[in-house]
């Protein structure tokens, strides 16, 4: 179990926050999950004692933190050297209200004494403008206001406001509440209202989890992964971020620091697919709405690989110099240059993300001819760019090549469009897309198999091993029992594994040799082992990956090959998707494990 990034996430589809083992909120962007981090201590800063919200218990010697069962509500218990204990409950309200989901930009923190005399200090120290502004609080009757250039936060509390504003120690003799949100009055009892919010939020998550189609084995891990994916969806537009953070490096001092608070077409497809597997199809429906807006915004049909969760918002990459970076390992990046890259796998991922809309009879609004015609436009670009050199799914910033995976995703777009056309009883369109798929597949096969190496390779020229080749059977491009695929899986296992986990690739990239394994690749490898009949090895790999989760059950992007600590942005949707996919694949069925008792 990794403690390197010992963070737990709360959120509600509008905002999210990360909380450490001592109950410190050290990351929260405002007023949405890709906004200015009003709590930014996770990424350091010129003032090490700012950019967070914590509760200091005098004489503290112990802290324990857990999620309330099947929810995004966190309980932290602090204990001091005299045996006094207090409980902190943190959540972002999310529940049904007036036939819609109430999900305000609001954090609720409730603090209650458990035993003994708890002398505490509340330290509420937001930062604005990426750590450059530390606003002084302005006192109100039962609230404090923090004003910056573009945002004003209001902290409303039933505690004596002077204790919070001046950070004075006081004895916590009864439960107390602090609500952080927009600069709006709180015209109700804080205690009663927030208790009601907590109960309704708990009920919401319990109801959501209740209808997940989870595997028999590893249920806790899958539920936590599913909730984490849900927290990465910005419900207002339907966009899905790749992670809730920016600039946690892939490896120590590597400068591989990226902003993942944006919507990659590729990552979002995998997220939608994983939630669909669990029966949580609403995220897909919201994402299709998002995609429709994205596609309409590109009259040329050329799609970028990544967009803001609010389409049309620029993603120019810049630095935030006031923040020193995670453990001082800058730079801190805002925006992502990948938005300027050519990555041609995106067209296939768009079609695949929408395909289930045409086949799933549970959906009240099935895919129709209008959606199919929109996707045909995407498919046309997939055909046009199938063999255009690009940066590939690993977003190499150096040279472009014709990448096998990108071309295979173009094939997948055509293949799925043909299937959809058959469902819609459009035989001419089905034939058209089948012919395109066959032509693309024939050309890929002409270069992707390397007889000398004995495996598929990642590009038309100077082909190397690449973990994305593990997905060829999963996508239906080759059969799992194809000797070439089996050989590829075995070769990748021999050459890309480091201390038990998979690298994306072994060669140098724009920043030298990669130092950490890419977690989703290890999940892909476990899935591929299962496909070629090596289930025991697949389960062993999966169990090993579960052990890498942090104490809150989250995974980041990477695993250090030496220390096995987590690195990279967190929670990483790719990694949580890999956990769900692999658990669903490898678990005993309910019939095997429960009904038949085998």
Image (spheres, grey):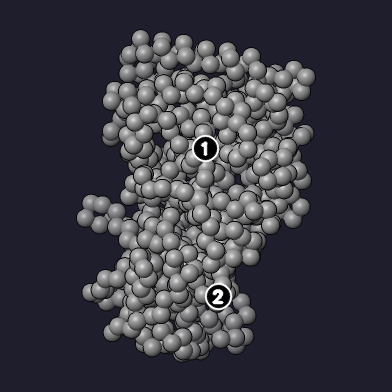
Picture coordinates of residue 158, whole percent (x, y):
34, 82
- Check the image and report above or below for 454 versus 58: above
The residues tagged by marks 1 and 2 sit, at their Cα atoms, a distance apart of 36 Å
The C terminus lies in quadrant: top right
For mark 1, give the secondary structure. Answer: loop
Q: Are marks 1 and 2 in contact (CB under 8 Å)?
A: no
Whether residue 160 appears in this view of the structure is yes
Locate the N terminus and report the quarter of the image it occupies.
bottom right
Q: Which residue is mark 2?
A: 47
Which residue is located at x 50 percent, y 85 percent? 120
Place of residue 30 in the rendered image (x, y in percent of width and height, measured from the top left): 40, 62
The residue that mark 1 highlights is 341
Q: Nearer the viewer, residue 95 or 121?
A: 121
How many numbered marks have been drawn onto this rendered protein structure? 2
Residue at figure coordinates x 34%, y 77% from the top left = 145
Asked if residue 198 shows in the view, the reply is no
Image position of 68 with respect to 423: above or below: below
Q: Residue at x 66, y 58 (%)?
A: 2
């Amino acid at each position: 179990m990794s403690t390197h990034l010992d963070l737990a996430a709360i959120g509600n589809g509008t905002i999210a926050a990360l909380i450490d083992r001592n109950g410190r909120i050290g990351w929260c962007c405002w007023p949405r999950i890709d906004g200015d981090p009003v709590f930014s201590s996770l990424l350091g800063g010129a003032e090490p004692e700012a950019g967070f919200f914590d509760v200091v218990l005098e004489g503290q010697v112990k802290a324990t933190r857990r999620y309330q069962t099947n929810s995004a509500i966190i309980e932290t218990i602090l204990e001091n050297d005299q045996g006094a204990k207090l409980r902190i409950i943190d959540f972002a309200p999310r529940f049904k209200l007036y036939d819609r989901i109430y999900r305000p930009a609001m954090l609720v923190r409730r603090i209650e004494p458990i035993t003994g005399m708890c002398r505490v200090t509340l330290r509420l120290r937001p930062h604005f403008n990426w750590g450059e502004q530390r606003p002084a609080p302005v006192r109100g009757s039962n609230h404090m206001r923090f004003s910056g250039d573009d945002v004003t936060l209001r902290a409303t509390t039933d505690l004596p406001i002077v204790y919070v504003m001046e950070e004075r120690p006081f004895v916590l003799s009864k439960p107390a509440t602090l609500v952080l949100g927009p600069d709006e009055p709180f015209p109700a009892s804080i205690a009663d209202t927030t208790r009601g919010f907590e109960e309704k939020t708990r009920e919401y998550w319990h109801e959501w989890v209740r209808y997940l189609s989870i595997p028999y084995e590893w249920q806790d891990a899958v539920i936590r992964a599913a909730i984490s994916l849900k927290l990465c969806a910005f419900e207002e537009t339907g966009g899905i971020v790749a992670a809730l953070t920016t600039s946690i490096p892939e490896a120590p001092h590597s400068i591989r620091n990226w902003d993942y608070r944006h919507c990659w077409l590729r990552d979002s497809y995998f997220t939608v697919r994983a939630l669909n597997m669990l029966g949580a199809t609403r995220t897909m429906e919201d994402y299709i709405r998002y995609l429709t807006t994205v596609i309409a915004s590109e009259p040329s049909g050329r799609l970028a690989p990544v967009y803001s969760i609010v389409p049309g918002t620029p993603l120019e990459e810049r630095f935030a110099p006031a923040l020193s970076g995670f453990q001082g390992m800058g730079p801190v990046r805002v925006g992502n240059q990948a938005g300027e890259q050519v990555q041609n796998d995106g067209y296939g991922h768009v079609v695949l993300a929408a395909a289930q809309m045409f086949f799933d009879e549970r959906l009240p609004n099935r895919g129709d001819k209008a959606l199919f015609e929109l996707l045909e436009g995407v498919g046309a670009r997939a055909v046009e760019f199938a063999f255009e050199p690009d940066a590939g799914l690993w977003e190499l910033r150096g040279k472009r090549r014709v990448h096998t995976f990108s071309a295979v995703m173009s094939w997948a777009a055509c293949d799925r469009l043909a299937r959809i056309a058959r469902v819609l009883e459009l035989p001419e369109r089905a034939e058209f897309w089948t012919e395109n798929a066959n032509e693309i597949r024939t050309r890929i096969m002409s270069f992707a198999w390397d007889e000398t190496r004995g495996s598929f390779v990642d590009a038309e020229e100077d082909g190397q091993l690449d973990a994305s080749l593990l997905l060829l059977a999963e996508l239906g491009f080759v059969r799992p029992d194809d000797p070439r695929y089996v050989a590829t899986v075995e070769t990748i296992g021999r050459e890309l594994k480091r201390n038990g986990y998979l690298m994306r690739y072994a060669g140098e990239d724009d920043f030298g040799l990669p130092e950490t394994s890419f977690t989703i690749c290890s999940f892909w490898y476990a899935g591929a082992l299962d496909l070629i009949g090596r289930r025991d090895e697949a389960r062993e790999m999966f169990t090993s990956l579960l052990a890498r989760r942090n104490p809150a059950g989250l995974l980041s992007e990477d695993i250090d090959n030496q220390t096995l600590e987590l690195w990279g942005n967190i929670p990483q949707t790719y990694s949580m998707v890999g956990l769900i996919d692999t658990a669903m694949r490898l678990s005993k069925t309910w019939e095997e494990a429960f009904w038949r008792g085998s």
